[in-house]
Each structure stands twice: as C-alpha cells, then as structure tokens.
Image (cartoon, rainbow, N blue to C red):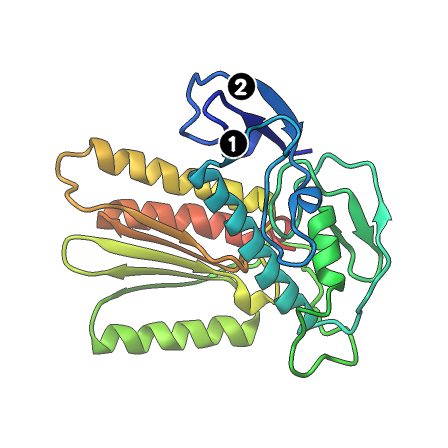
Amino acid sequence: MAEMGLTPTDRWHLLGRHACHHLGSTEIIETRTFDELALTHPEWGTLGVPGDVSGPDAKWCSNCKDTIEQMRSRRYDVIVSLKRQVPYRDVSWTTVDSNDDCAWCGKASSATQYNDDLDERVCPACARKYNSPSIEVRTPPETDRRQETPNSEVDPIRCTHSSGEAGSSDREQARQRAAEEGRPYVEVKVKQKYADVVCDIGGTGHRFTPTAVREIEALQAEQQEKADTDQDHKSHVGTDIHPAGTHVQTRSLLPDEAKRHAADLAAIAADPENWQ
C-alpha cells in the first residue's frame, strides 16, 4: 500500500513512489499506510490527517496534497468515461492480493479491489467512488460499449505541421482519421524556434495504464533536464498528462528533440499492452 510519513514540523508527506520532493533528508518520525478512505470525511469528502500522533496544527504538505488531488481528478475522469461506456452500476468488488498500482487514480501498490464485469483492478477509494451515485452520466448505456483491445501493435497516425491555417487543416484531418480508424495520434507542431508534441489514444477507446503514464512522465522529465542544461534552450518545457489518461502534451522543445520525443511517445502509444 502507499505510505505517508510525519515530519517534526507536523507535516504529513507521501512516501515511496509518490514521495514529496520537499522531503530530501528530512527526518520521518511516524510512518502510516496512506488509507485514503479512513482519512476522508464521510460527508464533506475532505482529506484529513491522523489525529492520534500529530498535533492540532498538523496538516498535509501542500505539494503532497496537490498530488492527492491529481489522483482524485484522474479517478473522477476515468469513472465518468467508463460510465459512458458500460451499464454496470453498484457493482460488487472482490478483495484481491495485489501489489499493482491502481488502474484509475494511479495510487501505488493499492489495487486490491476487482470486479469481473468491469475487469478493473483498483484501490478501495476508487471502488467506493465508482458505486457512488454522485458520479453519473446523462444517458447511461444499456450495453457494454467498450472496444476490444488489439493483440498486436497499432501504428499511430503521425502529423508534423507548422503553426498557421494550412497546418491546422492538416492537423484536423489527421486527428479525424485517427478517430475513425481507432488509432493513436501523435503530433509535432513546429512554431518558430520551438515545437510542441501531442500524443492521444482517445480514438482507440482506451487510456494509458499507470505503468505507461510513468514511462511518459520519465520521458518528459528527461526532456526538461536536457532543456535545463542546453544553453540554446531559453524556454520552459511544459508538460501535461490529462487526468483521463488519454492525452499527453510536452511543450517548447527544440524541433529535433520534439521529433525524437514524438517517436518515443509513439512507441508507447502503439503498444496495446500500454492501454486499459
């Protein structure tokens, strides 16, 4: 299970794979399992901290709180997307022995709940949220509309274009083709000195697995490190992974780096093992 730790300053931090970068070599005086359900107020949904070991002023580190909110945002988007595709509601979850990350929110080593109809393995907080009537779509489907996962790689639709009206037209045609053919879409948009890269698998009817998201985050971090050490690179490299897990963007790369980065993302997007 994911873990959390208390520092002498009465701040709780996430540990392990979600470890806060503010921690460094800071002393941890108490370690707990990060039991999100137990720490969530049943009526308001706010996240608290353990009250039996910390003082009255104890609270979450702001960075770790943001990380948890990102998990919750991913959870919400995935559930909404799934409820648009499947008729299953108020499902029964089975507790399984698993050390996998949650398939929905990405919480480390927490996927202990499984449902056969959904064929999803998630954390207890995601399982409970799925069954909550607070998340519902306008017109729930009567049948399971999910697409089958292919058994072999799916070649992405690739588009490299310059900013401007002509480039926008090429982009829209490529995106439409990817959606119609159920293929990943990878785009390099060359501006003046820099270029942006987009990778989207929404047209396949799937989303990236937590493992694939981590690989993408590592590629983005690598690009940020390269930019920081390159004297010719004067712009900040921005990154984004949509909470729904279908859309990835890396901004302000040098054009040659953008093409290499696009190729790396395309390799991840092409492999159905990276879809869920």
Q: Which residue is mark 2?
A: 28
Q: Please identify the quadrant where the C terminus is shown.
A: bottom right
Look at label 2 and name its amino acid.
Ile
Which is nearer the eye, 67 or 212?
67
Q: For residue 96, which quarter of the picture?
A: top right
Q: For residue 81, which quarter of the picture?
A: bottom right
Q: Give the alpha-carbon distance from disc 2 to disc 1, as whole Å.
A: 9 Å
Which is nearer the eye, 18 or 230?
18
Checking the image for residue 13, the label placed there is: 1
Which is nearer the eye, 19 or 276?
19
The residue at 27%/35% (across/down) is 226
Residue 166 as seen in the image, left or right of residue 193: right
Residue 173 as seen in the image, left or right of residue 252: right
> Eyeballing the image, is 67 above or below 138?
above
Q: In the structure shown, which secondary structural element does the residue marked by tag 1 occupy?
A: strand
Q: In the structure shown, which secondary structural element does the residue marked by tag 2 occupy?
A: loop
Q: Where is residue 222? Give x, y as percent.
A: 36, 36
